[in-house]
Amino acid sequence: MGLTYQRILLKLSGEALMGDLAYGIDPTIVQSIAQEISDIVSEGVQIAIVVGGGNIFRGVKGAAAGMDRATADYIGMIATVMNAMTLQDALEQINIQTRVLTAIEMQEVAEPYIRRRAIRHLEKGRVVVFGAGSGNPFFTTDTTAALRAAEINAEVVFKATKVDGVYDADPKKNPNARRFQSLTYSHVLTQDLRVMDTTAIALCKDNNIPIIVFDLSVPGNIRRAVMGESIGTIVGGSCEIT
């Protein structure tokens, strides 16, 4: 089976790097993700990654605990850079050239985000990891993923999670919850299915970028998604609700 996508945006939550730990980064999980990314880079796929920071600090929780929301969000952005650098190191340990580009300048450890530079890195076969979110408080890393996907002309957003798709109810609480194979952007928005936040969904809708939600913990799932296999749930403008 040939490649379905040539340039992708992979959205990783901070929690995805945490594994079964209560906090922080599980090196074994990071190495496993790096190996999966390596497998698709070897096929010629251009891959950009947006990583969250919830395994270290989550701005919304900080604000709920009494912090100024903007300050809490900036701290969360810095946490994403820690995750991005960790992922970069794991990839370069297996000889995958990687560049971290940050929306907040940290020139000693990463390049500043410049759209044309990011695209050039991708064209040269390097993995690009976007850190520090969008550089603005009050915006999630989901929104950053949609924004960066549009900016670099990615063909798809892969939302890698801990569940195997989008359900009409929480499958952990409701054993009869139904998993969707495909959804329209409008249905996700009107039914508040929380695939990604509403700003991210609207950005993908406006730019006609499909979103594929799948379980990251299943080995080989990133490759299967790139190859166009039917895994998880696809959200798109031409999709039916199935």
Image (cartoon, rainbow, N blue to C red):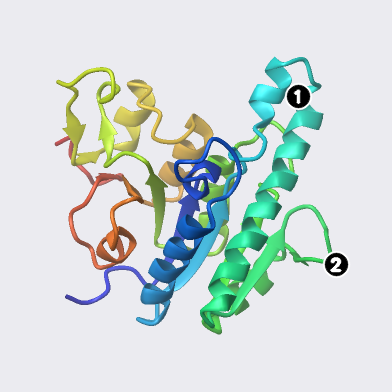
Q: In this view, does 137 lie above or below 33?
A: above
Q: Residues within 10 Å of mark 1 (few under 14, many from 20)?
A: some
When asked about the image quadrant of residue 220, the answer is: bottom left
Residue at image x 66%, y 48%? 80
- Would you name the residue on which mark 1 appears? 69
Where disc 2 sits, the SS reads: loop
Residue 242 location (% of width, % of height): 14, 36
Residue 152 placement, left or right of 2: right
Where disc 1 sits, the SS reads: helix
- Would you name the residue on which mark 2 appears? 108
CA separation, marks 1 and 2? 27 Å
Residue 111 location (% of width, % of height): 76, 68
Which mark is drawn over residue 107?
Answer: none
Q: Which of marks 1 and 2 is in front?
A: 2
Residue 81 location (% of width, % of height): 70, 53
Instruction: Work out whether residue 132 or residue 190 is closer to the camera in this orientation and state it.
Output: 132
Residue 233 placement, left or right of 189: left
Q: In this view, does 58 lie above or below 216?
A: above
Residue type at mark 1: give it. Arg
Q: In this view, does 120 lie above or below 13?
A: below
Q: Residues within 10 Å of mark 2 (few under 14, many from 20)?
A: few
Instruction: Work out whether residue 48 or residue 114 is closer to the camera in this orientation and state it.
Output: 48
